[in-house]
């Protein structure tokens, strides 16, 4: 293993979590070679560096059975650079995996020997079953209790696996990667469509999946989703958990598969290197939807690499909620008092535990996440704390949350800073959330405004100043030494919250 070189600026950086050493994963795929360095092996992994090189190792494997020499040179150069980057980032452990092109090419083993000799470090060549399993674990890592089909479309193959909770079953690997289809058919879409139809018709992993979502993984599926976002004018440009109904996914796939890419609205959002594979990806998506009849097609930004990282975790770390873990880390890094934001969770439990404000377990989970994020914008200019917090949360690297939930978190923290004034709030973010979530965000934001006037973000105060719905009133209790915290501004904020609830406010 290469000895890490840890610079003092990284070792003592205040904006980083330094309790664990960085981990590097390198994925030698059929189309690209990618390095991702994560802050550490944890439940909600945060990349600190990400780079890919489109080497095209699988471009001619289907017809020649060999990895192209020029592609090998590009991949070797990428590996050399990636190992150097990992050393200077202080990486303690580097894991390298190779997928379809390398495992299927006749000279794949020789290429791996060459890579290991020139760059050092063992390379694990994944079997089709292992690749499918790790893709499924990527979905487990990125979604809250997933239940559906994980489909990872790479350059050389399509991995399909059934995911339910943490269980991975019914895996399959099919020769339907975009590069392979282009190579096998000479770029003929009609021939490719026949190959896709034949392969998916017999796929056991899709049997019994009707009505379940398909979780799409891989660069081609991401490019298709990016194109769909552009055509719809979707307001939140976050790929993870972006979804569309099954019927719409089918119609969109048909559109892309038959059209000249240059004629598609929003094609500029897709890289030029990826555009030639769009049509083949659309053919795969169209046939999958026809065969499985899913409820939705949902994008997963997490795949084999994140599945591999998840596989490295111990049982305690795996059991953590990925959203709350990420919010706790952000609170630790950016709030004035991590202890105080944890107290907000219990303090608001008392209010939202009332019968009139009863909430589902998922709503409670989102409220707790919003409490953890309530103070991450405190260093911004006072006039822009709400706006900057909203943007940071709406576009943050969170997993385990859908887009309506993401909008709720952003709105709740926005309202906590600016109050219920919405003249500077873009209506686009509210388009994503349901009316119930918008109402809950307003209520929580108003409650947090009360809390911060009591505590000034100091821990140990609000546990002693309960806020409850009591006897038809909204009652804030300031006992003993806390009575002097009463004042006009606090009373005004309590009354604003009470009006939302249709109650009278009282400070005892």
Image (cartoon, rainbow, N blue to C red):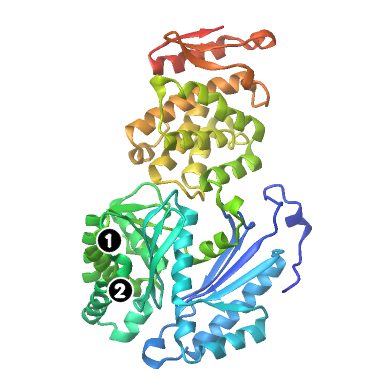
Of badges 2 and 1, the one in the foreground is: 1
Relative to the observer, which residue lies in front, 154 or 159? 159
Indicate the position of residue 376 as horizontal and vertical percent values: 59, 37
Q: Quadrant of the C terminus?
A: top right
Residue 302 in view? no
Alpha-carbon neighbours of circle 1 within 10 Å: few (<14), some, or many (≥20)?
Answer: few
In the rendered view, tell whether residue 172 sits above or below residue 479. below
The single residue placed furthest to the right in the displayed view is 8
Relative to the observer, which residue lies in front, 31 or 386? 31
Residue 331 position by quadrant: top right
Q: Alpha carbon of mark 2 to alpha carbon of mark 1: how far?
A: 25 Å
Q: Residue shown at 42%/66% (left/top)?
A: 218
Task: Name the disc covering residue 280, or none.
Answer: 2
Q: Which residue is mark 1?
A: 208
Q: Residue shown at 30%/70% (left/top)?
A: 204
Q: Residue shown at 41%/72% (left/top)?
A: 154
Indicate the position of residue 102 as horizontal and vertical percent values: 49, 83
In the rendered view, tell whether residue 361 sits above or below residue 60. above
In the rendered view, tell whether residue 313 sits above or below residue 106. above
Q: Is residue 301 left or right of residue 234?
A: right
Q: Which numbered disc, 2 or 1, marks the residue that appears first in the sequence?
A: 1
Number of marks in the image? 2
Residue 292 in view? yes
């Amino acid at each position: 293993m290469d000895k890490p070189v840890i610079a003092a600026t990284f070792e003592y950086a205040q904006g980083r979590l330094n309790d664990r050493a960085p981990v590097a994963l390198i994925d030698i795929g059929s189309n690209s070679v990618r390095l991702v360095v994560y802050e550490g092996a944890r439940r909600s992994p945060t990349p600190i560096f990400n780079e890919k090189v489109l080497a095209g190792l699988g471009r001619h494997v289907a017809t020649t059975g060999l990895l192209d020499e020029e592609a090998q040179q590009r991949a070797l150069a990428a590996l050399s650079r990636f190992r150097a980057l990992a050393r200077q980032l202080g990486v303690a452990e580097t894991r390298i995996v190779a997928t379809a092109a390398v495992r299927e090419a006749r000279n794949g083993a020789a290429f791996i020997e060459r890579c290991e000799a020139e760059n050092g470090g063992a390379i694990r060549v994944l079997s089709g079953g292992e690749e499918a399993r790790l893709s499924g674990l990527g979905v487990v890592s990125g979604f809250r209790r997933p239940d559906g089909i994980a489909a990872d479309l790479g350059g050389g193959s399509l991995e399909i696996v059934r995911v339910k909770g943490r269980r991975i079953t019914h895996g399959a690997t099919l020769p339907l990667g975009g590069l392979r289809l282009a190579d096998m058919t000479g770029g003929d879409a009609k021939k490719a469509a026949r190959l896709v139809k034949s392969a998916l018709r017999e796929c056991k992993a899709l049997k019994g999946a009707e009505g379940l979502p398909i979780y799409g993984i891989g660069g081609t599926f991401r490019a298709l989703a990016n194109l769909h976002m552009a055509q719809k004018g979707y307001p939140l440009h976050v790929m993870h958990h972006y979804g569309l109904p099954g019927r719409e996914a089918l119609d969109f796939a048909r559109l892309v598969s038959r059209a000249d890419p240059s004629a598609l609205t929003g094609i500029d959002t897709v890289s030029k290197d990826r555009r030639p594979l769009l049509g083949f990806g659309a053919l795969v998506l169209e046939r999958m939807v026809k065969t499985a009849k899913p409820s939705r097609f949902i994008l997963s930004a997490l795949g084999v690499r994140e599945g591999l990282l998840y596989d490295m975790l111990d049982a305690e770390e795996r059991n953590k909620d990925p959203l709350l873990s990420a919010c706790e880390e952000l609170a630790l890094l950016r709030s004035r008092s991590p202890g105080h934001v944890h107290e907000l969770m219990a303090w608001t439990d008392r209010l939202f535990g009332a019968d009139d404000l009863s909430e589902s377990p998922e709503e409670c989970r989102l409220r707790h996440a919003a409490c953890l994020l309530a103070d991450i914008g405190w260093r911004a200019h006072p006039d822009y704390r709400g706006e900057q917090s909203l943007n940071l949360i709406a576009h943050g690297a969170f997993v385990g949350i859908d887009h309506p939930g993401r909008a709720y978190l952003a709105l709740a923290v926005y309202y906590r800073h600016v109050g219920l004034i919405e003249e500077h709030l873009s209506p686009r973010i509210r388009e994503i959330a349901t009316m119930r979530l918008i109402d809950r965000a307003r209520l929580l934001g108003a409650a947090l405004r009360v809390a911060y006037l009591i505590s000034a973000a100091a821990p140990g105060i609000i546990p002693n100043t309960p806020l409850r719905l009591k006897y038809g009133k909204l009652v804030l209790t300031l006992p003993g030494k806390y009575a002097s915290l009463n004042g006009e501004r606090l009373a005004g904020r309590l009354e604003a919250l009470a009006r939302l609830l249709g109650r009278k406010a009282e400070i005892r």
